[in-house]
Image: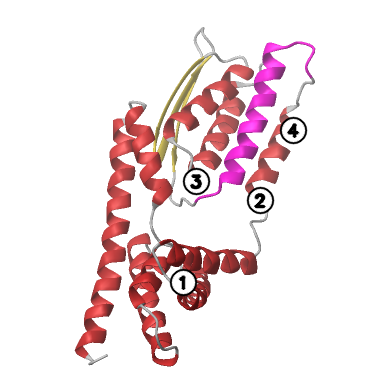
Amino acid sequence: MSRIPIREATDIVLEVGRILLTSGATTNRVELMMSKVASSFGYAKTEAFVTPTGIFLTIADGEKDHSTSVKRIEGRRIDLGKITAISHLVSKLDQAFKDPDAPNMSVTKLRAELYKVEHAQPWPTWLQVFCGGGTSGFFCLLFGGSWLEFGVAYLVGILVSTTMHWLGMIKINNFLLNALGAMLIVVFAKTLDIWVPYIKLDNIIIGGIMLLVPGLSIVNAIRDTMSGDLVSGTARAVEAIFIAVAIATGSGSMLKLWALMGY
């Protein structure tokens, strides 16, 4: 791709970084993808510094012009599909830059592709709820539950996934959201225990809690730390610890309250 104005290149590179970061990509991957896009535009001298909550970017043309921008990241969610789509798009740009015979991509088409990725429809809500129930049920089996407990855990997973979807629309903070989710797991499990005899609540509650465990955040924290991004690694680790504390607080407080009521 031929060189485009430096301000336009900065805007596109920032948009690529923003989509990746808000979709749960590691910081070193975001920085690498941003550098590749800038190089494809003919700006090899690019410095990108990424944290979980912000992107700092400087692009220079090697002579006298340079552009520095800061992008604040407020919301993040896990969307591996968007990360894969952006990675494929960046690979096409990089191939077109290195291979003159490769098909070129105009800026207009590139922006259209980025818009398409950004506004891609997620999986239907009913499928997410169905998978949430399956996750809870199969983790219950993994921890030694019976098939009867699997059915109860499956129902708990469906109820919790549906409620968490509704709560997510309110835009409450992550700590409170996970605490409420853990409380609801205990409430649903205890309520179903009244109607379904001969079940162990431990396996059912553990299976439901696995829906909330920040597994990918922990993995990203380790990957960022091992790659030398100490600020991002520490920030992600602290975020994962706070989510774990929220889960423990919500489930523990509800179990204690249920015990005080004599159940």
Q: Looking at the picture, how far across and down is residue 77, in whole percent?
A: 49, 52
Q: Dot 1 lies on which element?
A: helix
* Side (left or right) of 128 relative to 171: right
Q: Which mark is residue 107?
A: none
Q: Are marks 2 and 4 in contact (CB under 8 Å)?
A: no
Residues packed near mark 3 inside 10 Å, few (<14), some (14 to 19) or many (20 plus): some
Q: State the residue lying farthest toward the left.
A: 260
Mark 4 or 1, closer to the camera:
1
Range drawn in magenta: 78-102
Q: Earlier in the sequence, mark 2 or mark 3?
A: 3
- Between the C-alphas of marks 2 and 4, the distance is 17 Å
Residues packed near mark 4 inside 10 Å, few (<14), some (14 to 19) or many (20 plus): few
Q: Looking at the picture, how far across and down is residue 122, in whole percent?
A: 64, 56
Q: Dot 4 lies on which element?
A: helix
Q: Earlier in the sequence, mark 3 or mark 1?
A: 3
- Between the C-alphas of marks 3 and 4, the distance is 23 Å
Q: Are marks 3 and 4 in contact (CB under 8 Å)?
A: no
Name the residue beneath numbered marker 1: 167
| Amino acid type indicated by mark 3 | Thr
| Amino acid type indicated by mark 1 | Leu
Residues packed near mark 2 inside 10 Å, few (<14), some (14 to 19) or many (20 plus): few
